[in-house]
């Protein structure tokens, strides 16, 4: 009998196998433009998203988070286009060379690194929370939002601030 963790891993592995070597036309970002935290105090650039979409050939891959029975979030991928309009679109027209998956809490994936040769993007399953001081935030992985990065140093800065691994 497959475990819940196996189901999530299979979904993600199938996505990677279907996309590796494919031409990705664009990445769509479905962003939360009014987060509950002060984005101005965050010392690195990123996009705070409900989901992202990858358009490859005639297939649209919708990546979002899903909560596990253990209460953590991880990635889930469906091949359907959402009904909402993306907040931002990044035109690529590049071949996806590799996808690296990094596991976090309870061995559930929390980071995807997508390498297009001339560009690398990072998709993290995480969250940023307010504290009593608006200048101090709490950072977590395997949480409800998609954090989209286009800069490795920004990812590393986020990961240094994470409260648990």
Image (cartoon, rainbow, N blue to C red):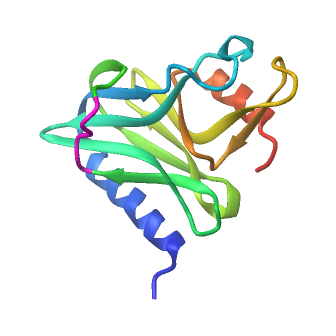
- Above or below, 41 relative to 13: above
Residue 43 lies, in percent from the top left, at 73, 15
- Above or below, 136 relative to 110: above
Task: Identify which residue is drawn at 55% across, 20% down.
Answer: 34
The image quarter containing residue 159 is top right
In the image, 55 versus 80, the foreground residue is 80
The single residue placed furthest to the bottom in the displayed view is 1
The image quarter containing residue 126 is top right
In the image, 117 versus 29, the foreground residue is 29
Number of numbered tags placed on the structure image: 0
Task: Identify which residue is drawn at 36% across, 52% down.
Answer: 77
Residue 66 is left or right of residue 104, and the answer is: left
Residue 69 is covered by the magenta coloring = no
Give, as a single range, the part of the protein colored magenta.
Answer: 79-84
Residue 95 lies, in percent from the top left, at 28, 32
Magenta portion: prevailing SS class: loop
The single residue placed furthest to the left in the displayed view is 58
Residue 120 lies, in percent from the top left, at 46, 27
Residue 51 lies, in percent from the top left, at 42, 37
Task: Identify which residue is drawn at 52% across, 33% down.
Answer: 122
């Amino acid at each position: 009998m497959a475990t819940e963790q196996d189901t999530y891993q299979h979904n993600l592995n199938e996505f990677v196998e279907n996309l590796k070597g494919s031409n990705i036309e664009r990445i769509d970002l479905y962003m939360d433009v009014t987060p509950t935290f002060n984005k101005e105090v965050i010392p690195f650039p990123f996009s705070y998203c409900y989901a992202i979409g990858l358009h490859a050939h005639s297939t649209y891959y919708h990546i979002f988070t899903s909560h596990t029975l253990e209460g953590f979030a991880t990635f889930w991928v469906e091949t359907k286009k959402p009904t909402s309009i993306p907040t931002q679109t990044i035109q690529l027209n590049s071949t996806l060379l590799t996808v690296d998956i990094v596991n976090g809490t309870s061995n559930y994936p929390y980071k995807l690194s997508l390498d297009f040769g001339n560009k690398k993007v990072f998709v993290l399953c995480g969250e940023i929370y307010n504290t009593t001081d608006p200048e101090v935030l709490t950072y977590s992985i395997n949480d409800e939002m998609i954090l989209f990065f286009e800069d490795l140093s920004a990812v590393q800065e986020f990961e240094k601030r994470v409260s648990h691994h």
